[in-house]
Amino acid sequence: MTLEGVDYSWARPGGATLKAAGKHFAVRYLYPDGQGGKGLDASELADLTANGVEVPVVYESYAARAKEGRAAGQSDAKTAQAALVALGLPSGMPIYFAVDYDAPEGDQGVIDEYLRGCADVIGLDRVGVYAGYWVIKRCKENNTAKWLWQTYAWSGGNVHPDIHLYQYRNGQDLNGAVDFCRALKDNYGQPSAFGAAKPPQPTPEQPAAPQGTYTVRSGDTLSGIASRYGTTYQMLAAINGISDPNKIYPGQVLRLSGAVSTAPAGGGAGTYTVVGGDTLSGIAQRYNTTWQALQAMNGLANPNLINVGQVLKVPGSGAAAPAPSPQKTYTVQSGDSLSGIAAKFGTSWQRLQQLNAIPNANLIYPGQVLKIG
């Protein structure tokens, strides 16, 4: 069995065009709020679904993101899952994670760790990978991905016998630039195999309450609430002590602002809730201690792996940690890159990406206001 389909990023061929061309599916990018056009949004999903076009999904922060290993996989899977749920797609459907470069065999170890990080969040049975033949082959052998989408690029004419999807021709024109794909299995990760796609109905805007709280409604997501109030889901999770940002429930009262850490007056230990951009050494400095002491106090196996929303024990020194200095910002200029801005302010592009919740580090635009820290 084979079915013809497409994948694309910035194009919008439309469901009617794809249907008329005999295309049964369109693999689309998951990004919060559509990522300024590249990602799938609710209106496009509705159009494709109305025309009988299935919509498997892929997530790509940037081409070689998988080289950053397990923590990156965990972060990407959380972002992808939140976008999936926000669109009303079946929450248990697979997500393909892109290894969008000619990865040598020496990179396979860290690629496997990246995919294991994805599995930590959504489960191995839902983890897919997009890659050339050799990465597909190694992921299959190493059991780090269950869903396989191979591109003809970086494949040397080889086609793996177990793939679900095959991207066989790039740069085609169907009311915009698309790539041609084939589904080679009956179930290739399409929404209808996991439940009907039901884009959520928009809820009326709710003004910020005088007390700075919001009561969760049916269909709400933490990222959607954050967008409505000009903040980030990471910050809301930290303020409210939410360990899993995908788990909120109707009737839950969320604080929209407030301190994210506490330290008791007197001796003993207090707690601190990790926010975006934090490092263990940075938290240690705020509490006049060392990262080694915090690692031991919290039983952390890896001091480089702490998560947004994680509650850490901190020393009680008789006073709360000093308030952070006013937030610096920078307005992106034409020609800027995230790495260039980071160098200008003596930080790293990874920190800027995390601080500003930027899914794709290569995609910033003039006029965008970035937090510097």
Image (cartoon, grey):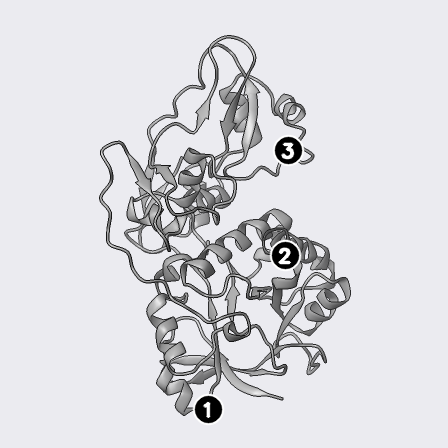
**Residue picked out by circle 1:** 22
Per the image, label 3 sits on a secondary structure element best described as: loop
Per the image, label 2 sits on a secondary structure element best described as: loop
**Image quarter (top left, top right, bottom left or bottom right) of the C terminus:** top left
The answer to which of 137 and 25 lies nearer the viewer is 25
Within-10-Å neighbours for mark 2: few <14, some 14–19, many 20+: some
Which of discs 3 and 2 lies nearer the camera? The answer is 2
Within-10-Å neighbours for mark 1: few <14, some 14–19, many 20+: few
Q: Where on the picture, by quarter, is residue 13?
A: bottom left
**Residue picked out by circle 2:** 123
Q: Marks 3 and 2, how far apart in space? A: 24 Å
Q: Marks 3 and 1, how far apart in space? A: 52 Å
Ranked by sequence position, the earlier of labels 3 and 2 is 2
Instruction: Where is residue 222? Give x, y as percent.
Output: 40, 48
Ranked by sequence position, the earlier of labels 2 and 1 is 1
**Residue picked out by circle 3:** 303
Per the image, label 1 sits on a secondary structure element best described as: loop
Q: Residue at x 68, y 83 (%)?
A: 157
Q: How many dots with numbers?
A: 3
Within-10-Å neighbours for mark 3: few <14, some 14–19, many 20+: some
